[in-house]
Image (cartoon, rainbow, N blue to C red):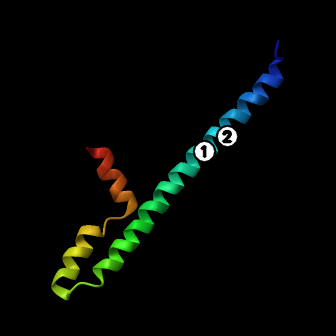
Amino acid sequence: MISSPEFAHKRLHALLILLLAFITVACSQRQIYEASHANRLQECEKLLPAQYQACVDEYGESYDDYQRRKTDK
């Protein structure tokens, strides 16, 4: 049978691993969004001035705004 302190230590270790995994996934999603966002905005710079602003308006959403909009649906 597992002693109480040993069980608590293993449980804490498992929780820390899960927390780190969650943080890593969250950071990765933000990084992917921001890299994609930067690429889209770079593509906007290739457009004519009349089209540029519409492009920036379409892709100018921050990651935090994107997340809020996504959860509001």
User: Residue 48's quadrant in the figure?
Assistant: bottom left
* Residue 48 falls left or right of residue 60: left
For the residues labelled 2 and 1, say whether their Cβ atoms are less than 8 Å apart. yes
10 Å crowding of disc 1: few (<14), some (14-19), many (20+) = few
Which quarter of the figure is the C terminus placed in?
top left
In the picture, the disc for residue 17 is 2
Question: In the rendered structure, which amino acid carries the disc numbered 2?
Answer: Ile
Mark 1 sits on what residue? Answer: 21
Above or below: residue 31 compared with residue 72? below
Looking at the image, the residue that sits furthest to the left is 50
Task: Assign a secondary structure to mark 1.
Answer: helix
Above or below: residue 49 compared with residue 1? below
Residue at figure coordinates x 34%, y 58% from the top left = 65
Marks 2 and 1 sit apart, C-alpha to C-alpha, by 6 Å
In the picture, the disc for residue 41 is none
Task: Assign a secondary structure to mark 2.
Answer: helix
Percent coordinates x, y for residue 32 in the rendering: 46, 61
Residue at figure coordinates x 60%, y 44% from the top left = 21
Above or below: residue 63 compared with residue 10? below
Q: State the residue in front, 49 or 43.
A: 43
Percent coordinates x, y for residue 34 in the rendering: 43, 66
Residue at figure coordinates x 39%, y 58% from the top left = 64
* Residue 45 falls left or right of residue 53: right
* Residue 28 falls left or right of residue 43: right
10 Å crowding of disc 2: few (<14), some (14-19), many (20+) = few
Which quarter of the figure is the N terminus placed in?
top right
User: Residue 55's quadrant in the figure?
Assistant: bottom left
